[in-house]
């Protein structure tokens, strides 16, 4: 993967205010796969103290979207067309880790998957499995 694509992903990620709200960081970028980690800030918890499903979804969606972007031409962007989430366990832990992967790249549609884990010490619990479709777009202008 070119340094330009890595820089594009890092710059785009830094511009996402939602990821800043989540305290998220890019942990790994490779062709067709991106991992994002985040703590569970107090303002992202639901009434039982777990990370809100929106927190889990946002991290998984962004990881999958950036995975798709990693296999696109440099001038392209991607938007989520549809995303399905299976919540598997309560999102409780010290850290949330979302890894997005490209399942099938394409010029018009990119099929993606994200696995989201809650991590406490050495214990990793899968909290969500997501599948979706990203649409490559060319920015206007």
Image: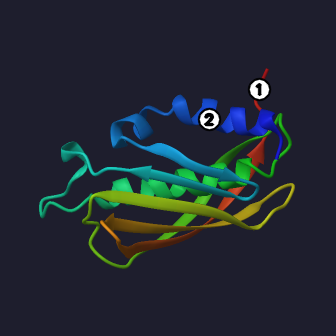
Query: Is 52 on the left or on the right of 78, as rendered?
Result: left
Give me the residue at 47% from left, 43% from top.
25
The answer to which quarter of the image holds residue 32 is: bottom right
**Alpha carbon distance from label 2 to label 1:** 21 Å
The spot of residue 14 in percent (x, y) is 53, 31
Name the residue tied to disc 1: 140
The spot of residue 89 in percent (x, y) is 31, 77
| Residue 14 at least partly seen | yes
Name the residue tied to disc 2: 10
Give me the residue at 14% from left, 60% from top.
49
Query: Is 108 on the left or on the right of 30, as rendered?
Result: right
Task: From the viewer's side, name the closer residue of 22 and 95.
Answer: 95
The spot of residue 124 in percent (x, y) is 38, 73
Give me the residue at 46% from left, 53% from top.
59
Q: Nearer the viewer, mark 2 or mark 1?
A: 2
Query: Is 95 on the left or on the right of 61, as rendered?
Result: left
The answer to which quarter of the image holds residue 112 is: bottom right
């Amino acid at each position: 993967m070119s340094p330009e694509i890595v820089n594009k992903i890092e710059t785009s990620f830094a511009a996402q205010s939602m990821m800043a709200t989540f305290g998220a960081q890019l942990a790994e970028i490779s062709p067709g796969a991106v991992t994002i980690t985040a703590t569970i800030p107090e303002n992202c918890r639901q009434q039982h103290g777990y990370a809100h499903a929106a927190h889990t979804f946002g991290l998984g969606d962004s990881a999958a979207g950036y995975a798709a972007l990693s296999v696109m031409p440099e001038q392209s962007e991607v938007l989520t067309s549809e995303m399905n989430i299976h919540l598997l366990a309560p999102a409780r832990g010290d850290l949330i880790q979302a890894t997005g992967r490209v399942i099938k790249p394409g010029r018009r549609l990119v099929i993606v998957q994200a696995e989201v884990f809650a991590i406490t010490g050495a214990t990793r619990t899968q909290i969500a499995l997501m599948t979706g479709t990203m649409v490559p777009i060319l920015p206007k202008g």
